[in-house]
Image: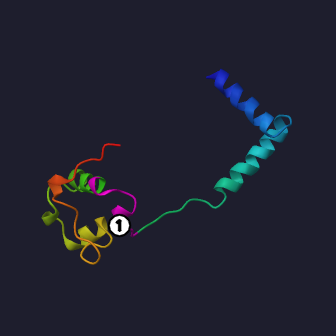
Amino acid sequence: MEKEADALKDSVINKFQGDENTAKSGMTSELHAYFGAGFDININVSLDKYWNDFDVKDFVRINMKIDSWDSLSEADKKACFLYIGEKRELPTDFAGLVQEAF
């Protein structure tokens, strides 16, 4: 592990074409620029914003102990899928949703 750490240190020093202090200053500036905006917290968004249908189903099955879409309230369905009933229907049969092979 020490060998990798030394290689990383040398790489950063070479990147900034200077000594260790120049590298520290340059790397600090890059990190501040990259993470300076802070993090983003999203609340009140449906699960399908980030997950595919199978992942939503798996979350519901494991955490809510639900084994069919009919067991979910309308509010819970909206929490899972943004446009259910408006622009799209529930995904295929609950048991028919399988994990993608990728």
Residue 66 visible in the displayed image: no
Count of marks overlaid on the render:
1
Work out which residue is located at the far front of the displayed protein and give it. 101
Category of crowding for the residue at label 1, using alpha-carbon neighbours closer than 10 angstroms: few (below 14), some (14–19), many (at least 20): some
What is the magenta range? 44-54
Residue type at numbered disc 1 = Ser
Q: Is residue 41 above or below residue 13?
A: below
Residue 50 image point, x, y percent: 40, 59
Residue at x 21% of width, y 53% of height: 97
- Colouring convention used in this rendered image of the protein: rainbow
| Image quarter hosting the C terminus | top left
Q: Residue 81 at x, y = what percent? A: 30, 67
Asked if 17 appears above or below 98 in the picture, the reply is above
Residue designated by label 1: 46
User: Does the magenta run of residues contain 52?
Assistant: yes
Q: 69 or 36: which is nearer to us? A: 69
Q: Is residue 96 visible?
A: yes
Q: Secondary structure at mark 1?
A: loop
Q: Residue at x 18, y 66 (%)?
A: 72
* Rendering quarter of residue 35: bottom right
Most extreme residue toward the bottom is 86
In terms of depth relative to the viewer, which is nearer, 63 or 18?
A: 18
Q: Residue at x 30, y 47 (%)?
A: 100
User: Is 72 placed left or right of 51 in the picture?
Assistant: left
Q: Residue 4 appears in which quarter of the rendering?
A: top right
Magenta region includes residue 39: no
Query: Split into 4 quadrants, where in the image is the N terminus?
Result: top right
Return the x and y of residue 94 as percentages of the image width and height.
Answer: 17, 57
